[in-house]
Each structure stands twice: as C-alpha cells, then as structure tokens.
Amino acid sequence: MGMTHIVDRRLNGKNKSAVNRERFLRRYRHHIKKAVSEAVQKRSITDIERGEKVSIPARDIQEPIFHHGPGGRREVVHPGNQEWVAGDTIPKPPGGGGKGQGQGQASPDGEGMDEFAFQITQEEFLEFLFDDLELPNLARKKLKDTEAFSYVRAGFTSQGVPAKLDVVRSLRGAHARRLGLGGARKKKIKDLEKQLEALKGAPDDLDPAFSHEDQIKVLEEEIARLKANVKRIPFIDEIDLRYRQHQKQPKPATSAVMFCLMDVSGSMTQMHKDIAKRFFILLYLFLKKNYKKIDVVFIRHHTSAKEVDEEEFFYSRETGGTIVSSALKLMHRIIEARYSPAEWNIYAAQASDGDNWNDDSPVCSKLLANSILPLVQYYSYIEITPQDHQMLWYEYEKILEQFPQSFAMQQIADPGDIYPVFRQLFERKAA
Amino acid sequence: MSSLIDRPNAPESEQPKAGTPISTGSEWTFELIQKYDEEIAKCAAEFGLDTYPNQVEVITAEQMMDAYSSVGMPVGYHHWSFGKQFLQTSKGYQRGQMGLAYEIVINSNPCIAYLMEENTLPMQALVIAHASYGHNSFFKGNYLFRTWTDASAIIDYLVFARNYVAECEERHGVDAVEEILDSCHALMNYGVDRYKRPAPISAAEEALRQKEREEYQQRRINDLWRTIPKLEEDDDPVKRKPRYPEEPQENLLYFIEKNAPLLETWQRELVRIVRKLAQYFYPQRQTQVMNEGWATFWHYTLLHRMYEKGLVTDGFMLEFLQSHTAVVYQPPFNSPWYSGINPYTLGFSIFTDLRRICENPTAEDREWFPDIAGKDWLETVHFAMRNFKDESFIQQFLSPKVMRDLKLFAIENDDQEDHYTVTAIHDDPGYRTLREKLARPYNLSYREPNIQVWNVNVRGDRSLTLRHIPVDRVPLGKETDEVLKHAHRLWGFDVHLESVDEGKVVEEHHCPPRGAEEE
C-alpha cells in the first residue's frame, strides 16, 4: 500500500462539461429556438435580458436502449412487509400499473418526468434570439469604406521628424555601433600596451643594435594611432537615430445610433405603443450585440415632432392629428448636427398606425428618398394596424422599390407578429 | 434499523485506548486530511484491506457536477448525452437533491477519489474510508474487476479514446461522429462478452494495433462478403448452409464491429471504443450491492475503530453516524420515497450479518451457514468480496435474519391475473424462494432483455436478424423500434428483431418498418 497523494484540484478548470453542454444545446437548437421565441413574445420588455428555462419533451431526448415492457409475469421482492403471508392476493387497481412493478420511473419530487427542463443563460438566450439574423447592410461599413482612422504604433524607423525621436533607442544603437567599431581596436591597444610594458620593464640591452628603444617607439606610435582612431568614432551618429513610427489604420465604426420614430397621435393606443416598444427593444438588443456603443434617439410626433427621453417617448399621451414628415425632418437635423455618417452606423425604426395627412405622405417619401436613406444603414417601418393601409403605406411601397437594400416595411397586427416580423426584416440574406 | 448502527467489536477485542483525538473542529485542512488518511490506513491495514495506492482529489461542487456527468470517467470524449447529464445534475444540485459525494471513485491505479470542498471534516474522513479503502480494496480484490478491467491502463485508454474521437470529429465532422456514437450508446449494454474472458484494455496497444487493424479489418470484411453473393440454385431455406453466425452472438457491438458491411474504418474504431468502455463498466453493473455494501461496511468499521483508539471525538461520531444512517436507510415499499431496494442497505446488511454469523452464530446460522458460522469473520467477508457478484453473493449469503430485518416479501404480477399474489415472505417456508427471487434480477441477462445476433442473410439482402428470448412472457419495451434504428444505422441494411418464445415468434420489429402491403 503506497502513500496517499492528496491533490488540490479546486483551481483546475471547472468547466469540463462546457463542451458537452454546448453539444447538447447544438443538438436541440430547434427546441430551444422555439422556446426562446415564445418567451420573447410573452416576456415583459424590461426583463428581456435574462436567461430562460427551456423544456424539451423527454421523449425527444431519450437515449433509447433495449428494455422490458410491461406485461408477462414478474416477481419482485420488496421490503417493509406489514401483514401479508404467502398466498395472499391483492386485487389490482383498475387501469393496471400500481406499485407491483417496482420499476416505475417516479420522479422524487412528484414532478412529471415527461419534460426535460433546463436553464440557458442570458447570453445563450440572446444568441438563440438573434440566430440567423444579419445586420442589414453591415457590409457598407466594412474597413475599406470607413472614413475614420486612428494611428497605431508600428515599430521604429530611421527617418522621421525630431518630435518622434526615440532617445533610448537611438542611444542604444549608438552604443552598439561604438562597441562594434571600437571593440577590436581597443582590444588591440590593450595587447600593445601589455607588450610595451613588458619591453619597458625588461632590462635594456647595452648593445644599441639590440636595444628595445626602436621597438618601444614603434609600439607607442601604433598605440597613439589606434587611440586617435578610436577617438574618431562619434558618440552618436546620424545612422543611430531612431524615430517612432506610426501607421494610419482605418478605424471600423463601432458605434451605432438608433432612431426610434413613433406616432403618438390620438389614434395610437397604449396597445399600439407596447407593440412598437417591443419592436424597438428587439432592435436595440440586436444592435447591442453588434456594436460597442449605441446611442438611442427617441423622436415622437403628432403634428409636430420632438426629441424626448425614453420615459416620455413611451408613456406620455398626446392627442391631435398626424404629420409624419415633421419627425423625418427632425431626424435629418439631428443626424447633421450630431451623427456624422462617417463615424456612425445609423439605424432607424419608425412605428405608426398608418395615419397621416394625405398631403404629407408624398413629402415623407421625398424626404426619405432624398435626404435620409442615403445616410442610413437601414430604415424599417412597421405599421401597427389590422386595418387597410392608407396613403403613407403606398408612398412607402414606392420607396421600397427604389431602396430594397436599406429600406424595409412590414405590417404588425398583434403582439404575436412582432418577432416573426422582426426576423423577416432582419433575416440573414444570402451573400 | 438500529442493528445497523451497533458498534462492532474491535478486531482483537482489545480495550479502547484513551488516545488523543486528531482534531476537534469540523473544518478540514490538507494537513488534517493527511493525518486522518494515515490513521484510516493504519486501521485498514489491521483489517488486511489490500488496496491500490490512493489519490485523493479535493474539488469544488461544480467540478463534482462535471465528474458526475461524465459518468465517473475522469477523461471522456465529448458527447451531447454527457451535456444532458450535466444539465440534469446541476439542476438537481441547485434544488438540493444531489446525493452524497462519495459515489465518485475511479477504478484506476492509483485509485482516484474525489472529496468535495464543502464537506465537513467527519464527512471527508467518511469518504476516504468509504472510497479510498472500501471501494479501492473491492476494485483490487473482486474477481470480476480482476478479470475484466486493468486499473493501471484505464486512464491512458480514456485519453486515447478522447483523442481519437476528437480526431474523427475534425476529419469527418461532429455530426457524423455523433451519429455513430449515439447508435453505439443505444447498444452499449450489448457490447460485452459475458462468458469469454476479454483482453484487458490498453491504450498503447490500441494505438499501435489500430493501424494494423485498419488494413486487416477491411480486407477481412471484404472477404466475408465476397465469398457470399453467388446465389446457389437451391435456395431452399431448409437446406441452406448453417446460419451466419453459426452460434448466436450476444455481443452485438463486437459483431457489428467485425461484420457490418458498410462501416468505414474510423466508424469501426468508434464502435470498438464504446465496446471497450462497456467492458470497463461491466463489472460495476454487476456488483453494485456488493461494492457499495463492502465500502459502507468498511467506512463503518474503520471509523468505529478510530473511535475505539480515541482518535475521533463523540461529536465526530455523531455526525458520521447521522450520514451513515441516511445512506443505509431503506424506505418500506409503501413509502413515497421508495424506489426499490437500496443497494447500500442490502450490501451493508449482508456484510454486517456475515460478521455476526462468524462471531455470534445462532442455531439458525449454524443450520444455514455451517461453513462459516463461528469462523474467522475477516477471512469470511474477504472471501465473499473476492469471489462473487451481486446475484451469487445474495444467493450465497443473504441470511434469514437480514430478510427478517428488512421484512422482505415477494410479490407476483401476472398480466393474466387480476390480482397480485404474495409468493413468499420472511418466514421459514419462504426464505429460500425469497432469496432466489431477490437474487435473480441482479443477473444482467435477466434484468435486460436477452437479445442476440441470430442470423445474417449473407446471400440475399444482407439483413441482420436479432433474436429475443423472452422470460416469463415479458415483452420488449416501447423504445425497441428506436434502438433498432440505431442498429440499422450501424449495420447499413435491414435489421429484424424477433421474439421467440418456445419456438414461436411472438413479437416482431423491423427497421425500416415493414409496410402492411408487404405482409
């Protein structure tokens, strides 16, 4: 029997099962997606960002094996006999089954076993929520098109402006050069000096023919020459100079601004607004997954438009008629003032019940086509109405023909439509 | 139940010594675990427990869940079913349903046991005694483990298997690998030769032979199928040449690995890996009562020995006994908590009673166990541990006293009767039948349907026919068709399954399903 090894494994990875868990989610992604899209429809807006309990019918995930079915004759031994003796009979409960089989799969807490329930995280929830969805026109803001740049360090160069001179690097180079050029000579000087000392230390021969004098002189001259040489090596030379190099790198636009435009005229009920809100929330979450920074601009309008905060946007009531173009004009002004299309990915979602002053609808379509759509990545219009379309819808349909890439429109009749419509609008398009 | 927590006698019935307790608090440290282990090892040596070297690993609850969900394999290949198990385990744990941690001990050399960091010190000691000395000595001593598994090779083999599966995933895609593994898992219980002694598994050898096998196997399969297709003019079934295989084969996975016409080499290797794992788990599936009973008996005995030596406090013993009692609790059949016979209770009761029969035999014991009544108890329990599996262990050693203590009774459920019948209870006329009936379901070939490879239509459609021999008219379960689909995926041609009771086909399954118009 050997010594027992006691090992502290607590710091080892705990996610040994992560891959297997991922495999499980992968295998049942259809079930999970369904659960997620149902959850989106049912959930209140504020708690859209959490995980979700997913249930899968147990039969769908069973790993089948050969086993016995009910029937035939079996004998099972049980503990805890109270009053029976051999030969006693107990009538079977009607409908069969009962305790006699002893192999039933009763769940310990009485919960049915026909559902396999588990929790997915918020991250996974969003992953499934936006699975198969593609940011519209994301391609346009790809690197080559971006107009914003940043400078990054890119090593050193031997040419540059004095402001970028790197002193440490330059001196290090100079030092190396001095060693390189002078090292061999200094060594030689040392050797010669040693010889010289040896000569000087030795008793001089009286015979001038054998005197060391000449040798000493030669040596001394050589040493002087070498020393002068060494001295001529400059402390710092032009070629030692090193400048910090910077490179211009295109900066991908990682910020997006999302314009929420909503009609708040008297004809828009709270139900309409709730539907619109869910749509905006979806768009927001969707953008959030793709951009580092997102600004949200809320514009509400009836006959005139106003930029408001979120609370006012969704909850304060207005009455009166509708002029949609007021909101479009305001949006255009805000873009010009604050959101240069060079730096911002611009998205807009407009929600309305379709009401507009008939005279205004052509104005809207002109505004969109001429001043707004050229600036934005994507503009989506949802009309929340179970009724027939009005003028605005037909005007917008013309826009759709002109700008099929950056404009989309859909009709929503009830909350159940939101997610399907959202998916339709943002469906991943084949490249 | 009180008899279960009686203090056993000291081995040489020496007087308790007033030693100094190792510790008094319930917080554990690595030093304390080391000390407890040393003392437990000394006690284990007194009782002659022969073990592999131990490796005790302290892990967190999350890691324990990981370990649970890889069905006790310290290294496993990736598969969604382990992910499912993990989700199940973590849910159970969050709800506070998770069982005790000392279930996890790996049959390897060194023997790896996991301790959860949340455990109190007495619990850690209990786990060490239970796993590192109880289970460990069982792994090393029991004949099934000795025959079927090679403790020193298993970790290497698991690593080999994982790498191989990962390699296949890379080459053939996760889905293709998953399909094959799913199908193999469905037949995993039929991946063992029950009667032949298998070659112990070894990673090095596997890796070495794999290449060889690759070439050889394909040739062999080609041969089998090449010699066949000539249709003989006389195709009368009666005069046909003997069936192929000539004798029914119980190891379905082995048969498929060697004979499936269409499997690619890597697929055959996957079948082989699952088959080898089935072999590794085979002894465990047949010795649950004994293994748990033995480990429980020894944690109980070893910790009492520690108490007698004065090494642990009264408080320690109280906490230990509370856990122990919970482990060996057997709810009666009419309790809402009842889910069959608790293997811990049954095994522990039998081993405890064996000791009593040796030390304090009654007239009844002398009549029932003339060979062991009054003999050396330590030798007796070791003999029982080494040479039996659950079925034979119960047959041999379940005493009338244990049957009385547990108030066992046998009940018959015949679907041709409108009532259940009590066929035997814990009384003189009933003991022997009761014991037989209790032992029977521990036989795997009784617990699982007896299904074997019956025939391959080598000259015709290459279909594979499996034959099920029902026992007591018990039919196949409702998943049968699903399993057949898996068999079909591996075999590549039609698969038939027929239940043959006394020469008559009583049930038929086909994959693909047989349309009514064909019949």
Image: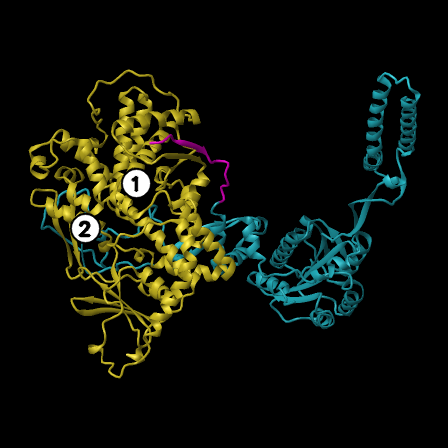
Chain colours: A cyan, B yellow
Splitting the image into 4 quarters, where does residue A282 fall?
Answer: bottom right
Q: Does residue B82 sit above or below A70 in this rendering?
A: above
The amino acid type, in three-letter code, at marker 1 is Phe
- Horizontally, residue B434 falls left or right of residue B188, namely left
The tag earlier along the polypeptide, 2 or 1, is: 1
User: In the picture shown, does residue A99 fall above or below A59?
Assistant: above
Q: Nearer the viewer, mark 2 or mark 1?
A: 1
**Point 33% across, 52% down: residue:** B278
Q: Is residue B383 visible?
A: yes
Q: Position of residue A186 (x, y in %)?
A: 84, 30
Q: Residue at x 31, y 73 (%)?
A: B458
Q: Secondary structure at mark 1?
A: helix
- In the image shown, does B398 or A344 lie closer to the viewer? B398
Query: Crowding at label 1, few (<14), some or many (≥20) Cα neighbours within 10 Å?
Result: many
Give the x, y percent position of residue B283. 28, 47
Kindly identify which residue carries mark 2. Answer: B440
Q: Quadrant of the C terminus of chain B?
A: bottom left
Badge 1: chain ID: B
Q: For the stretch drawn in magenta, what is the main secondary structure? A: loop
x%, y% of residue B417? Answer: 14, 60
Dot label at residue B139: 1
Q: Nearer the viewer, residue A17 or A377?
A: A17
The x and y percentages for residue A166 are 83, 38
Front in this rendered view, residue A339 or A235: A235
Residue at disc 2, secondary structure: helix
Subunit of label 2: B
The residue stretch that appears in magenta: A1-15
